[in-house]
Image (cartoon, coloured by chain):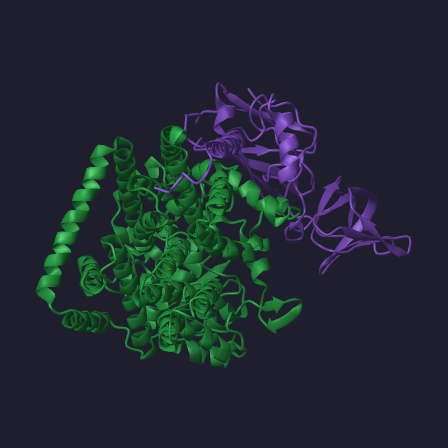
Chain colours: A green, B purple
Amino acid sequence: MTFLTLFLSLLIFFTYLIFISKEQSQNRPFLDRLIGAFLLTCFQIVFSELMIGLLGLIFRWIVILVNCIIAAIIIWTSKPLKSKWKMLKSDIVTAVHNFWKVQVNYPLIGLMTFWLIILLAYHIFLAWLLPETIWDSLRYHLPAAAQIIQNHKISDIATDTIFINAYPKNFELLFLWLMLLPGNDSWANAGQIPFFVFGILTIYRLARLSKLSHQDSWIVGVLLASSPVILQQLMVSLIDVMFSMTVIMAVWAFYRFVLGGDSLDLIMAGVALGLAAGGKGNGVIWAALLGMFLLLFLLARAKEKNGRQILTSILCFSIPVILLSSYWYGKNWWRYGNPIAPYQLNIAGHTIFKGDMSSYKYLIEDKLSPEFNSLSPAQRIWIVWREPVIRHNSFGSMGGLGSVWFILMLPAVPIAFVMSCLRKNWSFLWLCAAFLLPFLIFFRYQCFTRYHIFVLALGLVALGIVFDDFIRTSRFLRVFAFFLFIFSSFHGSINKNVTPQKMRELIHLPKSERSAALIFSYGDELHGSVNLLEWWHKQNLRDTLLMYHCDQWIFTYPLWDVNLNNRIQYLPDIKSPDLWAQKINYADWIMVSTRSKEEKWTDSINKFVKVYVDDEFTVFAKKV
Amino acid sequence: MTSSRFLPKRFKAVLLGIYLLLVSYCFISYWFISESPILSPVFAKLHSFVGDIKELPIGEKWTKRYTLRISPSNGAGLINKDCVVFLPFPARAGSRQIEIELRSLLVCPGYKSQVTILLNDDPIRVQPIGYNWQRIRMPLLSQRLFLPLFLILRFDMEKISDIPEYQHECIIQVFPDKDGLKVWESGEWKQQNEWKDLGGVRITRKAGILIIDEQKYALENWPFTVALTRWNSVLLRSQLQNVSIAACKVIRII
């Protein structure tokens, strides 16, 4: 079934690649069509799952069938198919030939590409090898997907984590795609890798649109892989790389439109922003910002365009954004009275939306090393960019953009900015506005590098301009960048949990045995629940219903098991023993806090027997 | 290619010079931060412009000089939870051993203070610590180029016997963690921004406020760092939150 996922994903991708044919978009280079097809593929997957999920029909074969039908309709509308397929084949052959020629003629580029392929292969291997281990993944990204699979629908559920209900879930729907079709989570960790690959291509195209040479554009594209936080995230089920790459793609598509593109570019910008806005709260700011840029652009060109063209442009941009993101925020508004729940929104001292917590306090302040508290946001960012760490992590709490960013890209940004101002080269200035405004809007939040991966796109284009402009030193700078790239990517790929010894241990275990609970060094992430989860995993259960109510929080995701066999259900706080007995009537297993009232109540029910006790958790099983 | 003909050559050369200077600064700053004694004054000056901090964020009052040619540090780091010391590559050239000093700040009857030391993948070492400074020297077994080296110190208190809880008598020092600290003293609240020795007092804990001999002192703005010495009674584990239980300083890498 894993191959079915790959096959179906490729089928949808090629469908769109044929759909955006050369005939329909004459000025669209092959790579632009590849990126466009990727965005539309993501759109189809997310939107189809959202609709099917809202209808309560999330079953493997329904999802496959619906997507096959959509693909068939698109193929049907792409007539004449034969000539388009022929053209696509010739495009692919030409692209591969050109690519190969550059690799052979420029040894440095060849070496960088070779190293990139090794990195990719290594991270795909790790994504497959490692169990889900990251706090956010275990707490809400993957449980959200697992709950949808379990309940066959997208709806709010009883949960001890409000994030499962309140966060927008576009990227979780992509994890769902990787879990539902194969029937296990073996490849859930690899969800961000396609975004990374297309992120490289997007940066290449951004550089080309900024009139850089093929060679320099490819070099700066590959240098995206020098960022440790990206590399660290490729092996785990987080969403920051997905988010950053989609906003970079949105900027690219919008840039294409500004440079004389058509409505398809705006649709792609809308799709990318819809994915981002429906995937993470701050994506809304990106959508609003680019929407504002679009309005300004259309106003500036009002004389050249008629009202209908302007309206078409606005609709092409906004409809995909609304389709992909409005449900999540609308649902929150209706349910919690706050579209950005659980966070509150204050503007100029006034509370616009009441929430349970402050996003800054929860996301940043509570997670900062205490020594950062007395520092200004600028000081924090400066320290983090200098990376005073030896081992990186996927949160980018003490570094993560890499040495290429700090040493070569960061100085290149002001230089490229000055040169662009003097030359009146508006394209780079536009990129500065597009990437720096969101960075500055969320300036306080930027002390974790995972929240501003997108600035790499600006740094890379600036570096490309420096390469291209300073001809005398460009060879030296490229070689220097190459060595920094090798170091930074090697350094960034080292993970505290992935020692050669650990890999040897894991590789001999079947995937079903590679539970986070069994990997000792992950105990920090699993906190006090590691013994419980290890015990649970060893029970090797199938199709069992576990109900839980714990005073302390627990990572529920490992309870589902690798093959998502079990059903996990949270019981909200119940006041009376009778109601409790009624609620747990159908449960096979009950998990409660040790010494809690729920433990006492369950103990008094003859139907259940205590099978596991530790300081924190007690588990009961139904008597056979 | 971007067109370069619109900019005068001399102007471009100036820009290139500025770029290379910035790159050099960032390169040295990234690799050596400012551990090198030769470069240290220069960087201290430069960093004061861009907002560097005096301490690396690995523990309050921690010595920054954790790498090349470490000299004895003046201040000791007070540690609440785990403490991690990272040893960057330049520090490790030719180094064979690391020397640290540890002491417990809580010496409670019925409890044994100990530190669990993890040095990369070396065997875990558990070391009991007492009220006096104790110097520990450890070999840097895992020293390999390009492999990260770090040291984790996990401070803990192990209960060894049951002693009934009663009113605590101790000498207490307080330090405001963040927004300053108000101390109720002589009938009024006084702003406190530095370490203060409150002398021998009785403490009890109420929600959010540590009451220290209600007749004499009360402290607002919990949490704050509290260093406790010369205990005469038992402190409950739950009360240890935000209380520094140990102090540590890196002496040198040899």
Front residue of A254 and A45: A254
Q: Is residue A344 visible?
A: yes
Image coordinates of residue B125 in percent, x first then y, are: 51, 32
Image coordinates of residue B188 in percent, x first then y, are: 89, 56
Front residue of A322 and A587: A322
Quadrant in the rendering for residue B79: top right
Q: Residue at x 49, y 65 (%)?
A: A550
Image coordinates of residue A547 in percent, x first then y, are: 41, 70
Q: Is residue A317 above or below residue A228?
A: below
- A202 relative to A580 in the view: left or right: left
Classify the position of the N terminus of chain A by image quarter.
Answer: bottom left
Q: Residue at x 45, y 54 (%)?
A: A430
Front residue of A344 and A610: A344
Q: Residue at x 59, y 72 (%)?
A: A354
- A514 relative to A287 in the view: left or right: left
- B115 relative to A83 in the view: left or right: right
Q: For the image shown, how many numbered marks are present on the structure? A: 0
Front residue of B176 and A9: A9
Q: Is residue A193 above or below residue A471?
A: below
